[in-house]
Amino acid sequence: MADASVGSSVGSLHHLEIWVPHLERAVVEWGWLLAELGYTPFQRWAKGCSWKLGTAYIVVEQSPDLTSTIHRRTDAGMNHVAFHAGSRENVDRLKDLAVDSDWFELYADKYPHAGGPEHYAAFLINSDGYEVELVAE
């Protein structure tokens, strides 16, 4: 068993790397959302960039090793990433602003309880098919 003592970073997210088919589009779509969640630009290179919050960072990269230009969240692999998004009002605000940044609402007919009656969240998907869940406190 890993050492998960108090104050330890064991188990916390170090980074998330997302390979994308169109870097500049991803920079706009992910950059807006991550900035709203408190991330700040961290690194930039020819085929990618990252944003950082605390000790964790998120990368978008158009890797030359990419074997497909299509992401399907329903295929085997990661389905979505969920972020704490603060208050219910902030989740509502982010959901409403998302449309202006090429994110689209999933499960609109069930908003804000698509995850269940006690779960207040917005489910968004971007133009490349990546899903994000924004969860209220």
Image (cartoon, rainbow, N blue to C red):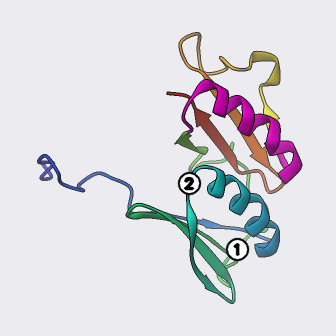
Residue 90 inside the magenta-drawn segment: yes
- The spot of residue 115 in percent (x, y) is 60, 21
Q: Nearer the viewer, residue 33 or 111?
A: 33
Residue at screen point 67% across, 20% down: 114
Residue wearing tag 2: 38
Is 13 above or below relative to 106?
Answer: below
Residue 100 inside the magenta-drawn segment: yes
**Majority secondary structure of the magenta segment?**
helix
In the rendered picture of this protein, how many numbered marks are placed on residues? 2
> Which amino acid type is marked by label 1?
Thr
Residue at screen point 88% across, 48% down: 100
The image quadrant of residue 61 is bottom right
> Which amino acid type is marked by label 2?
Gly
Residue wearing tag 1: 67
Tell me the element at label 1: loop
Judge depth for marks 2 and 1 and give the one in front: 2
> As drawn, is 37 to the left or to the right of 108?
left
Is 66 above or below relative to 46?
Answer: above
Residue at screen point 80% across, 57% down: 128
Residue range of the region highlighted in magenta in the rendering: 85-104
Q: Nearer the viewer, residue 98 or 48?
A: 98
Outermost residue, bottom side: 46
Q: Nearer the viewer, residue 21 or 123?
A: 123
The image quadrant of residue 136 is top right
- The spot of residue 97 in percent (x, y) is 81, 42
Residue at screen point 23% across, 55% down: 10
